[in-house]
Image (cartoon, rainbow, N blue to C red):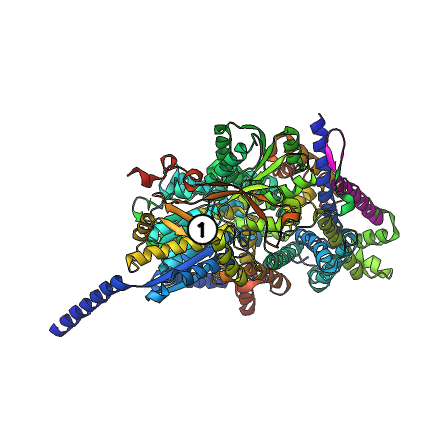
Amino acid sequence: MKHTISALLLGTALTLASASLASADDKNVKIGALSDQSGLYADLGGPGSTLAAQMAIEDSGLKAKGWTIDLISGDHQNKPDIGTTIARQWFDVDKVDVVVDVPNSGVALAVNNVVKEKNGVYINSGAATSDLTNAQCSPNTVHWTYDTYMLAHTTGQALVKAGGDTWFFLTADYAFGAALERDTTAVITANGGKVVGGVKHPLNTSDFSSFLLQAQSSKAKIIGLANAGGDTTNSIKQAAEFGIVKGGQKLAALLLFLTDVKAIGLETAQGLNFTETFYWDMNDQTRAFSKRFSEKMKNGAMPTMVQAGVYSGLLHYFKALDALGSNPHDGVKVVAKMKSIPTDDPLFGKGEVQANGRVTHNAYLFEVKKPSESKGPWDFYKLVGTVSGDQAFTPLAQSTCPLLKK
Amino acid sequence: MTAMTDDSIPATSRAVHDEMIAFGVMTAMLAIVPLTGIYPFFVMQALCFALLACAFNLLIGYGGLLSFGHAMFLGTAGYVTAHALKVWGLSPELGILAGAAAAAALGVITGLVAIRRQGIYFAMITLALSQLLYFIYLQAPFTHGEDGIQGIPQGRLFGVFDLSKPTVLYYVVLAGFLGGFLLIYRTINSPFGEVLKSIRENEPRAVSLGYKTDQYKLLAYILSGTLAGLAGSLKVFVAQNASLTDVEVAMSGQIVLMTLVGGLGTVFGPVVGAFIIVAMQQYLSGLGQWVTVIQGAVFVVCVLTFRRGIIGEIAHFFRRSL
Amino acid sequence: MQALYAQLLVGLINGSFYALLSLGLAVIFGMLNIINFAHGALYMMGAFVAYFLLNLGGINYWWALLIAPVIVGIFGMILERTMLQWLAGLDHLYGLLLTFGLALIIQGVFQNYFGSSGLPYSIPDVLKGGMNLGFMYLPIYRAWVVIFSLIVCIGTWYLIERTRLGAYLRAATENPTLVRAFGINVPRMITLTYGLGVGLAALAGVLSAPINQVRPLMGENVIIVVFAVVVIGGMGSIMGSIITGFALGVIEGLTKYFYPEASNTVVFVLMVLVLLVKPTGLTGRAA
């Protein structure tokens, strides 16, 4: 009897000791790259995001300091159900510390709740919804790269200042399109421009001719495309067919990625204005990164801003871990550390993680080159304007994030 | 013309006996899941889909009506339950009730349109109706479009059972599934179910016997829709979100696939089919879009060589009813 | 008023696609009693074949209009020979399920290899540009689509309703045993019919390639709308499906102008209304 008790006590003591040891220099990290691996967002995130995460692990230099870093990836298939199931399983069974990427706003918000519940770290790069750092913000979440507010704000402001003061909107008829149109309209009117009309089109429309005719007859200088994906590419393609750009009107896509421009082709996309926060051909550092990235991609693709955001977000996460000295496996603690260190990385430059989880960095207005100006297979953009991070993103005073009201 | 189900085995007392044993085995297996260390969320999801497939099977297997839009009930009930819990702050039991009631109402409205045609037309009409609803939900403000309804509070069922505890939630979902399952089982073995089967076999004959077949079909359709709605309401507690995925055509196709794999018109087939398809999605998710290809291939193989489904084949082999 | 003319014309363009697709469905249904769920996927294949012909073989749009439907048609005939024909005598619903599975396979394979964002296919040089009609700027390519699909639709109607081949076909639908007794190979006829219907879908795909991105999922939503078109028109007559196709395109076009929010639901709403008034569809006979 006495024996068993002392054995038990000894056992408990040992367990306690090993537990405290583990928390003292636990240098194990597990990363889960959750993305759309084969659907609509696979080209802008997907396998490229996993590659970017892998490159971040290599470049962090943590392995040399004795850290063990594992990376797994998952396919959420653009279904919130599947996304949350994978994320839950990652935390419960695979002991994942940080979830990265997650394009598709619906899935991103669903996963946001799971990460919060499990006290993990969530570095989102792929989703557009600004809710992640507003109404649904969480102490476990960092939102890199872009959001709807930034897109609307940068494109709207820059174009009005450049003389595009009358607008007509082609808006996808659902929450995302409405948010883009609302935010852009606010910026346009604030800068002295005017919205002369607009039309709501159904999601996944294959034929835009009716809407384009209305846009054409509105005589607006700028036709704003508050839509995404296939809707944006189809409306751009058909606008060219109806001679809209040749007729003197400009197209402004509020959400467009490098891979979309590639899919449309320069012949059709030339002259198009839109905002991104990363382009491979910005400076020596982005070119060096992109070259390495492209060499490892199956189709030689250059990184999109989403993939670049995964890389930079993880680098910053590793910096926070390094500063903490070990992995506390406590999401809130790590994210707090991330917020306390200013961001500075080769791809997005300097910025900060705001209290609501929003990362601020420069945003750029680009114009698509003419085919004659393009010197290579991925030479697509010319820079039209730069907006600094504190100007481009939601001012903290306007953020509806409950974390800010402490 | 061969009907879509194999009815060579008459419903005898032996059949009922077999089914009771199978039901006991199934219940016992499901009841011990939380003790086995199997990941409970996976089983809960599968249970919701199993109930959904059973509800669908009531219509096709016993009424001969193939609905290619059953996702509309799943999604509608899901949205209503989610909205009731999150915005109106209703208790879980009232939320489930609201969801199922919404599905029933949808069943009445769409049923009145759809049952005017049979066979292929019925399938195409239900498909079109669910697509119509998909677009409505996409645009309606309360569904939050692509974002879906997120962060739904799970609450306490009857003020007692804390649904945020996985084990408690598991047994609640299991109870919901078993309740729906028994209701369906009771229905197909009732006089109502017999009339339904006779309509499936030979509608003109049933009409000549004086049955108002449209009313029977409508009632079966509403019941099926309501139970599919119950599955949708339960799913909200498991997934904690309601999204457009549940109203998509692809979802309707999956419901058909689950039932087809398990066995159309068998009592346990849809349950087995649902577990297989959910497991397939889970374990093959690394294959990305190939999952769609595999599902398509399963469809083709089932239709060409395996029309009785797994349970149907087993039952046929042993000359038993399952 | 001018805007209205423009919208009517634009609606007619969309109607051309609906007409070609629902015509193909009607031809297949008439002979095989199968609702071809793979129709949207085969429409997409038509566009992809045109893309491959241009980019791999240097074969231009005009040849693609001829070759792509033939290639996809042959593919369809292989499907019919290896799978669909085994369903003869079974419940028609099995045909629906089988072709649904085929659609999943085809779309999934294309998605795996070509992603979802799509590939560009440009308008042939001759048809580039547009003409000013006074009330609108009409791209020449769109005008071409309307005229060409009208010709194809009427040609198909003529083939089936007015030629000897068509007479055999219609007879084989009514009474296959009797037609076989006259020494006509009915199974081969069924295969050829399926090939024809599928070829029409592929042709619509080629026509749409320069207008839309060539995407693996381009047929996914179209097919459901076309199903509704078919339910509205009733599957009884070839001419019925052509007229319904064009008419619904125009109605949809008008909705886009007057109440754009409803433009993707209007066809379904019309379907419900038609079903309430005349369950067999506008031109349909009792099933």
Task: Please say if C255 is above or below B171.
Answer: above
Identify the main secondary structure in magenta.
helix
Q: Residue furthest left?
A: A2
- Residue B10 x, y percent position in the rendering: 56, 61
Question: Residue A249 colored magenta?
Answer: no
Quadrant position of residue A237: top right
Residue pushed farthest top?
C1
Q: Nearer the viewer, residue A66 or C269?
A: A66
The one of A369 and A38 positioned closer to us in this rendering: A369
| Left-right relation of B73 to C150 | left
Query: Is residue A62 placed above or below A246 in the rendered structure?
Result: below
Apparent side of residue B304 relative to residue A158 in the rendered image (left or right): right
Q: Position of residue B266 (x, y in %)?
A: 53, 59
Query: What secondary structure is marked by label 1?
Result: helix
Q: Chain of mark 1?
A: B
Kindly identify which residue carries mark 1. B180
Q: Quadrant of the N terminus of chain A?
A: bottom left
Q: Is residue C156 magenta?
A: yes
Q: Which residues are magenta?
A: C131-160
